[in-house]
Amino acid sequence: MSRISISLTVNGETKEVQTEPREHLADLLRGTLLLTGTHIGCEHGVCGACTIEIDGVPARSCITYAGACDGATVRTIEGFDDDDVMAALREAFAREHALQCGYCTPGMLVAARDVVLRLPDADEARVREEMAGNLCRCTGYRGIVRAVLSVLAERKKGA
Amino acid sequence: MTSSESGLGVGASLRRKEDARFLNGQGRYVGDITRPGMLEVAFLRSPVAHARLRSVTKPAGAESKVFTIDDFPGVGTIRANSALPGFRISEQPVLAKDKLRHVGETIAACVADSRAAAEDLAALCELDYETLPAVFDMRTATLPETALVHDHWSMNAFLETRRDDDVSGLDAIAAAKVTRTLKTSRQSMAPLEGRGVLAEWDSRLEQMIVTTSTQMPHVTKSGLADCLGLDEGQVRIISPDVGGGFGYKGILLPEEVVCASLARRLGRPVRWIEDRFEQLSASANCREHHYILTAWADKDGKLLGAECEAIVDAGAYSSYPFGACLEAAQIGSILPGPYVLPLLRCHTVSACTNKPPILPYRGVARTGVCYAMETTLDALARKLGITAEAIRLVNLVPPEAMPHRNLVGKVFDSGDYPESLRRAVKAIDIPAVRKRQAAGETVGVGFATFCEQGAHGTSVYHAWGIPFVPGYEQSHVRLSPDGVLEVRVGVHSHGQGMETTLSQVANEVLGIHPSKVRVVHGDTALTPYSTGTWGSRAGVMAGGAVAEACRQLSVRIAAIGAALLQVSKDDVVVEDGKVRRKDTDSSVSIADVARTWYRAPQNLPRDVDKGGLEITAGYRPDPDTGTHSYAAHAVIARVDTDTGEVVLEDYVIVEDGGKLLNPMIVDGQVLGGLAQGIGTALYEEMPYDEMGQPLAGTLADYLLPGSSDVPDARLEHMETLSPWTTFGQKGIGESGAIGPPGAIINAINDALASIGAEVMDLPATPERVLAAIHLAKSGKQ
């Protein structure tokens, strides 16, 4: 199998990595870069467990070829330590019991952060609709929805 | 100050200790763990449901990387027998031999440095097989002309059970009789993390170390040792973070046996990670029931008796440890549900088919039985012209009858079943629904009431004769020199938050801050033997064991503390993390006691217990017939008669789980179960064609409920203590998944009552709803 070289900026660090044309980005992040916080749930872009940020936008890393990401800036769950919105979401997720087994959580947080930043006025129905691309098999979603809504409310109060 | 008052012990909604690692992407699941020199495994799986396997040709030049059953002559088959009379024994080869019995059955293991390269090898293997007619329909599986899944059996049934009360006189005296034919669909439990196995042979310890995503590490250890011909000390199972179980990971896997065999043979670690296609195609393994249920009632709706003909599609093999008939054989005993049922005639069949072997999914048989009983009750109510609430209230076991032994011998421990329903009725806006119905809207309200036996033990399971019978649950507690308490348990936590809840139990007894309690689980080398996490048992059993171990430890702590305080041990109490003199405020901390035992033994009293500060203690409720949590579900559903779409507008659950150890976590369990129950009711279905091929291969075809499909449910709790458990807690982990299909279909049928349509089969997809409407309309014409 032929190998290709790509350059990626991952969580602030630029790296030269080798990949196969058929390798998806989630496998590269997990296998080559040992960033195992990105999880693989369905490999069809349905469940959202692999959601990361590519060039500032949430993306499914399981249906993104690594080879197509040459020059891209990638952020995974391991790369949000200095982010206020992520910190607020983590606090809210723990408070609202928005996670159980933890497998969907990293992807859920990346998607939720995008909703918080993009839709400051979202109501419950909108949050449910926006988060519908990330499946959770444990919580029944109530805690997740409440966590996102609470961060939206905090930000409104703070603004 | 008692621990409950401190807000950290039993009854506190303490935030979870395990959250931090998950929120930061630092959880460790099998797929996150690698070893130097590790090989990845891809399985060549059966492309057909039923065939005679003639040969497997390995790819030229790669023969040494592909393994069939012939390469493992010493490896045994997987057997899970039942002592129930008439049980037919299946032998499940870990790699297929001679015959293929379901799509996805493992045939060969291919190893390579990467999974992708291993899959390439699997694709190059050539199979020669003779296709046989597939047994794909449990209703015809047992007919004499149907092909046999196991050639030496006389019919395709693992087991039949019968209960033969005489119901022949009921037609004459009943005011109403209804019969319903109902079917639930085959489902995939679909935890977000699939299965995964990493096996390594430690040549120094002569030990097989298997890191695997399991709910029951110790049972897996026993089963694996048996299959591999090793003694149990030569097998260590590590179950790290597990991304959801729900029953899917309560099994000894053929893949575990194969990976362990490969690791030993190759002298290298090997890993297999299940992908979603494997999960859906090879392991859609639960919930497929068929009922013909007849019920008789008097004019008030009081049940006079029931007759049930039930079939469960148990698939091709009897999985270890729960076996092929756990669901069907239970139907007769759980059909009465929370009701007083005077007579029951029931025949069940555990049908053997060319489908993946059945596993018990959250709620086990109860979800299907509750669905059948609750929809049949509503049909009776409609026929009698009484309300759904009325027919339930007249039949529910009343509180004054508790504890209550019902006609099949189940013993309900405590509770006020009718009150849960009354509260649900009060919480949901029935008048508004009736008003909208009068205005012509197809909206309806539905109820389901049920009880859930949990934490049932020896006295229940020994009669079933499954490969293990749960006995005393044990916990090992150890105070370390710095005063931190280690709590070791053999159950496994995979979302249930037991690292938190069991810390709260320890806090309740010893007053040690939960942050100073480390709960150790998921490693057979570190924890006492346990049958694991299943059957809504961990909160009762492990909770009771931890409390008992801490209680015994507190006696030893008190003795050392009293000596340090220079008083008699009768004059001290252990509370709030300290040993305190009863008459004054002077105290020593538990950490001081620990330091004394380990680092300043010269200060110990002469008569100190030489067992020190570690104890293994066991626990079993007495009686151990199980706790019964119970609930009333009430739902308002709107049906679009043009598209068949069902929208859940409101959902209320009134639940009684006895004492809630951590109410926040209990809510999470109930709400998570609810979402899964909604999936069963409306979305989830693995269809099979007549060749036995599964037709949903991705999560785009197999629909799991998303956030926009699940309503913002309202929960109310009653807390009737169980008289038989440590804190009065009851098993409640599966409850949420039991009621939704019954309640939701009843709401749909209430909405469609004006049309005269009734949905019978699950899930109530738009197609099925429209078909029911069409049938009713064409019947009227």
Image (cartoon, coloured by chain):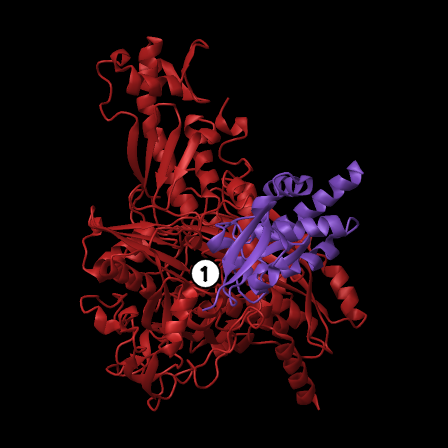
Chain colours: A purple, B red
User: Which quarter of the image is occupied by the N terminus of chain A?
Assistant: bottom left
Q: Residues within 10 Å of mark 1 (few under 14, many from 20)?
A: many
Chain of the residue that carries numbered disc 1 in the rendered image: B
**Can you give x and y, in whole percent of width and height, for residue B202 in the image?**
24, 49
Would residue B160 be visible to someone looking at this image? yes
- Residue found 45% across the figure and 67% down from its top: B279
- Give the camera-side residue of B354 and B369: B354
* Residue pointed to by mark 1: B194
Q: Is residue B490 left or right of residue B306?
A: left
**Can you give x and y, in whole percent of width and height, for residue B760 in the image?**
57, 76
Q: Is residue B90 left or right of residue A123?
A: left
User: Which quarter of the image is occupied by the C terminus of chain A?
Assistant: top right
Dot 1 falls on a residue whose secondary structure is: loop
- Residue found 50% across the figure and 38% down from its top: B17
**Can you give x and y, in whole percent of width and height, for residue B578 in the image?**
42, 19
- Give the camera-side residue of A123 and A115: A115
Please count the marks in the image. Answer: 1
- Give the camera-side residue of B747 and A117: A117
Would residue B102 be visible to someone looking at this image? no
* Amino acid type at mark 1: Gly
- Give the camera-side residue of B180 and B6: B6
**Can you give x and y, in whole percent of width and height, for residue B477 in the image?**
34, 33
- Residue found 67% across the figure and 54% down from its top: A55
Residue B592: which quarter of the image? top left
